[in-house]
Image (spheres, helix red, strand yellow):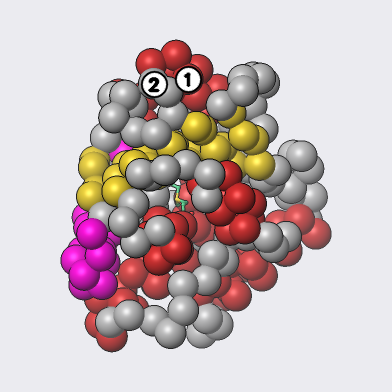
Amino acid sequence: MNLPAKYREIILGGSEPGEAYQKCMKTLTADGGEIDYELTETIVYATEARYATEILANGRPQRFWNFGDLEGGADERHYRILDGIEHLDIAFVGSGPYPVSAFLIKTRYPTARITCIDNHIAAHILAKAVIAKLGMDIVTRFEDAIDVDYRPFNAVVVAAMVSGKRDLIEKILETSDATVIVRGRVNLNHERLIQLGSTFRDDGSFGANTS
Ligand SMILES: C[S@@+](CC[C@H](N)C(=O)[O-])C[C@H]1O[C@@H](n2cnc3c(N)ncnc32)[C@H](O)[C@@H]1O
């Protein structure tokens, strides 16, 4: 799709990728903050593809920055939950071309098994290549989230941009014993479900006025 000029200038203007992403989100919020999945994906993929290709060219960065955490503290909120689970076997759903959350989690829990799942072929191929370049022990799977068998996992993290989160989470809770962390709100209550605030809607698009 065509990136509107305003975002094109930010993303391709030479800023550090995560900073460019945050500028896009601030611009969007200032403009009223409702965009569809296609534009959301274009902005996120522009950011993640830039990070991924940078690592493929130059190796490990000085730090992994969770650029999507606009309000801060998201990593610690994940750790407070994951710290309590022994023998972590995590499915990371919607890992993207640059699965920075998986990298941060693997860095904190080096013995954890992590499986990155994405239904976008470019995300899958880039993530697999970046993981190999970093020499990290992380599995990648090209699959739609709803088709995955979640029984082997004891924790599932669902990214904000994943579509159809409500049906997906119902399936995970019904078919596995996993603790589920979802970035975003779904209309469900369950003792094993933790919902973290997010500016993304259930269809995975950005919505600044979402809780
Ligand atoms: C861009 S990522 C964001 C995650 C971010 N890289 C991180 O580490 O926190 C969101 C990904 O979710 C994927 N996705 C959206 N809906 C999905 C679904 N139903 N099944 C699998 N992947 C999905 C998209 O293809 C996209 O790559």
State the image coordinates of residue 15 (x, y, percent, origin top left).
Answer: 55, 82
Q: CA distance from mark 1 to mark 2?
A: 6 Å
Q: Is residue 143 magenta?
A: no
The residue sitting at 23% across, 50% down in the picture is: 139
**187 above or below 142?**
above
Of helix, strand and loop, which one carries label 1?
Answer: helix
- Mark 1 near mark 2, Cβ–Cβ under 8 Å? yes
* Callout 2 amino acid: Ser
* Callout 1 amino acid: Leu
For this view, does 88 lie left or right of residue 179?
left
Residue holding disc 2: 176
* Image quadrant, ligand 1: top left
- For the residue carrying disc 2, how many other residues have a C-alpha within 10 Å: few (<14), some (14-19), or many (20+)? some
**79 above or below 211?**
below
Q: What range of the chain is rendered magenta? A: 119-137
Residue holding disc 1: 173
- Quarter where residue 203 is shown: top right
The residue sitting at 34% across, 33% down in the picture is: 153
Q: Is residue 62 visible?
A: yes
State the image coordinates of residue 194 (x, y, percent, origin top left).
Answer: 62, 34
- Quarter where residue 110 is shown: bottom left
State the image coordinates of residue 70 (x, y, percent, origin top left).
Answer: 68, 61
Of helix, strand and loop, which one carries label 2?
Answer: loop
Closer to the camera in the image, 125 or 136: 136
Q: Is residue 128 magenta?
A: yes
